[in-house]
Amino acid sequence: MCAVAAHPYRSLIFGSILIGLGGLLSSQDFRTDVRVVEVTIIARDKGSQKPVTGLTKDDFTLLDAGQKQTLTAVETFSWRTGAVPEVQPVSGWLTNRKVGVAADGPPVIAVMVDGYNSRFEDTHDAMKAVRKVLENSAWKGAIFGLFLVDQRGIHVLQDWTDSAEALAAQARTRGVFTASGADPQGLAPEAGEVEERLRLLQALGGMEAIGGHMQSVPRRRSIVWLTSGFPMNLALKYSSDWERAIERLSAMDVAVYPVDAAGLRLLPGFSASVGASQGARWPGPGGRGGRTRDNIDMMLEMAARTGGVAFYNSNNLAQGLKQAFDDDQVVYRLYFQPNHGKWDGHYRRIEVKTQRKGVELRYRAGYRAFPVNKELEQRPVEVLAAAPLDSTGIGLSMRLQSRPDGVVAQLVADAAGLELEPRNGLSVGRFEVLGLLLRSDGSLAKDWKQRFTVEFTPEALAQLKTNGFAFEQAVPAGVEYARVRILLTDLRSGKTGSLTVPALEPVKN
């Protein structure tokens, strides 16, 4: 049972425990109005393709479904070179924020290798190409992560590191992957709908998990997706899965850079890790029976919808990594409060223009205007239990304590991840806590869930900004488990933070 006090002045239920936890918590303010839309902009010179600096609010015009909007703010993010500080947790506490990244911190780039939708040789050669680039990288200070998706799910090969050499070493020692044998040109006629849909779900689910893992980054997030892809007609056939994933990635401000792992697959004698002649092209617009073109259409659509760039018909497979890095040199984020008044869940296209001559802009294509109190989709607890990555949409710190009446999980949520609603002089938050007890093999032993509402007085709100939101969860007894995973969801914003910690000791019946 969640031990949140009913009275506002007792909202921080164990404030004395919070002494010294400031290093775990962000200095950003939480938001109290979710009807603000954020649009991340990449501005480049049309000729040199270099980042354009010095743009202000007056340089941008934004249209929402053709209607001009008033920009409430424009932020500029540019990064400085320097070591990435590791978050030093307070003794006895664990946190889901592994690295400290400031708004002017370095780019954060996730490399996701798609071993499910790619041939073995394509995946192998793609990793060789990326490894070669990383080993000779001049991108000192950037943060990288390396992840693999296959038929079993997502695997963490290298969590966040500012060492390109360390990432290259992981790619070298763990760079031969097990592929499922999916044909990137299209599924065989005997393939069933389950196999078809898995091609989407494994790839999209991997991107969503990585995107959730990147939410502690206060600036733009990039995923370089090395894949042979899947046909666009599968995205259309399972449009609800496709649209839901695009929606989540856009909400997390994740730009996807698909890179065709097959390279010039139709030209014999070429490997994806070897440079191709500049004049090489596919024989005809559709390639082999049109299926290759259909895969590329999917990559183009994914990039356009999220603000990334697709790379195909090229054997320079590291180009996507370089583009993601270059794009993050200078980033603009535009904020506006839509004036349409139609929060009905429909998709609304965005158009951004600039008064500066010779400047081209890239940004996500639009957003869905969901109402504030839209009910969140419930995911199966088995899926949440199996996830190897903790979500950092809300910063969480946790420790387990043994008491005479059982084990209690004590948690502190970062105030920067919360969105509160002003109501009658108070600030009101609505949350859901999901607890999972996991066995040593990763399977789910038991789960429990609770929703609750917390009202903060102005005095408690001031404490919240400094100390975070603290609460407790009793861990169910009488169950054998090895780890405890807690997920906190802000029901107003949809943001989630999760954290997994080992059991205090083997707990048995």
Image (cartoon, grey):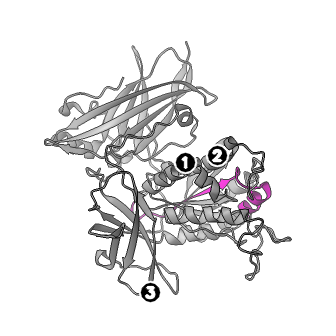
Looking at the image, is 154 positioned above or below residue 142?
Answer: above
- Quarter of the picture holding the C terminus: top right
382, 352: nearer the viewer: 352
Q: Position of residue 355 (x, y in %)?
A: 35, 83
Residue labelled with disc 2: 197
Q: Sequence-wise, which precedes: disc 1 or disc 3?
A: 1
Three-letter amino acid code of the residue under disc 3: Gly
Point out the stretch of residues depicted in magenta: 102-128
Residue labelled with disc 3: 358
| Residue sitting at the far left | 425
Q: Are marks 2 and 1 in contact (CB under 8 Å)?
A: yes
214 vs 134, left or right, is left
In 3D space, how far apart are the residues under numbered discs 1 and 3 (Cα atoms)?
38 Å
Q: Could you tell me which residue is drawn at 56 percent across and 39 percent down?
A: 387
Residue 241 appears in the figure: yes
Q: Which of the two marks, 3 or 2, is nearer to us in this view?
A: 2
Q: Position of residue 333 (x, y in %)?
A: 37, 66
Residue labelled with disc 1: 241
